[in-house]
Amino acid sequence: MTHFTAQFTVQGPDQPVPASLGGVADLSCHLSPSMSAENMEVRWLRSQDSSVVHLYRDGQDQYAEQMPEYQGRTELLKDEITVGRVSLRIRDIQPPDHGQYTCLVQSSVSYAEALLELQVAGLGSVPAISVEGHQDGGIQVLCRSAGWHLQPEAEWRDHQGKLLPSASEKMSQEAGGLFQTEIAIVLTEESSQKVSCLIRNPRLDQEKESTISIAELFFPKDNPWMVPMGVIPTLLVGFIALFSYGIWRQNR
C-alpha cells in the first residue's frame, strides 16, 4: 500500500518478502520519481506500534531511538540512496521479525510512506525416530522434530511414497515461538515395515525426512512352540500315571 504526496511517492514490493530463520532479509523501498534521499529522513518502523527499526537522519544512521531487538542487526543500504533507494537489510532473522513494516521518507516539505510485509519461516531439526514398544498387535514408532517456524505439517509415508495413517499427533510451541511436533504410527507385520517421517514447512515448501526399517522378527506373533509346550505337561502327567499303575500291578 502506497500513500501519495504532492512531490513523491514511496514504493515497496507488492508481495510479502520471504526470509529464513537466521538468514538475511532485504526490505526494498524506493522513491518515485527517482531522486536523491541523502538529505531526507528515512524511518523504518514496525507498523503495529510505529517503533523504530532503523533511522537515518542528517546524513547518518541514528540509533538512540532504535528498538533493542534490532540493535546490531540492521543496515540502511546506501549504495543507491542518490537515486532514491532506501532499502533495509535485517540480519540474523528471528521469529518476532515476522510482520508488517513501514518505510517512511520525509523531506523538508513533505513525506510519503509504504507498507511492507516480512514473512519469516524456518526449518527445524532432522526428524528423530524411535521405537516405543509393542502396541495394538504391532510396534509403535514415534517421530519428533523441533525448531520450526511457522507451524509445520507432519506425515508418515511408506517406501513407495504412499501416505500412511498416523496413530497420534501432537504440536506444541516452544520458547521463542518455535514449534515442536510429535507424530506416531503403529506398524504391523502386514503393513509396510520401512517407513519415512516427513516434516514440512508449507510456506517454504521445504521438508526434512528420516526413514526407519523394522525387521520382521521384532513383530509380535504366535510362537509355533506354544501349542506343543501346552500339550507336553498333559502327556507327562498321563505317562507318570500309566507308569505308576504298571509298578502297582507288578507289585501285586
Image (cartoon, helix red, strand yellow):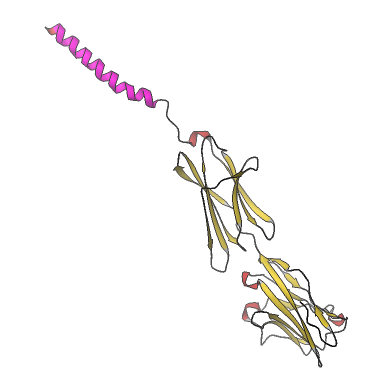
Relative to 233, residue 74 above or below: below
Relative to 251, residue 232 above or below: below
Quarter of the C terminus within the rendering: top left
Which residue does the image show at 55% across and 60% down from the upper left?
180
* Residue placed furthest toward the bottom: 108
* Residue 206, quarter of the rendered image: bottom right
Query: Disc count in the image?
Result: 0
* Residue 122, quarter of the rendered image: bottom right
Left or right side of 197 for 218: left
Which residue does the image show at 45% across and 44% down from the upper left?
133
Q: Nearer the viewer, residue 18 or 67?
A: 18
Left or right side of 50 for 144: left
Visible residue check, residue 136: yes
* Residue 212, quarter of the rendered image: top right
Task: Please say whether residue 60 is one of the residues in the magenta stretch.
Answer: no
Which residue does the image show at 38% across and 27% down from the upper left?
226
Relative to 50, residue 201 above or below: above
Left or right side of 234 for 7: right
Q: Which of 5 and 39 is in front in this view?
A: 5
Visible residue check, residue 126: no
Task: Please say whether residue 240 is one of the residues in the magenta stretch.
Answer: yes
Residue 200 appears at what percent x and percent y?
Answer: 64, 55
Residue 15 appears at what percent x and percent y?
Answer: 76, 68
Relative to 153, residue 246 above or below: above
Which residue does the image show at 42% across and 29% down from the upper left?
223
Quarter of the N terminus within the rendering: bottom right
Q: Give, as a single range, the part of the protein colored magenta.
A: 223-250
Residue 158 appears at what percent x and percent y?
Answer: 61, 42
Residue 162 appears at what percent x and percent y?
Answer: 63, 42
Left or right side of 242 for 109: right
**In terms of secondary structure, what is the magenta stretch mainly?**
helix
Q: Nearer the viewer, residue 209 or 192?
A: 192
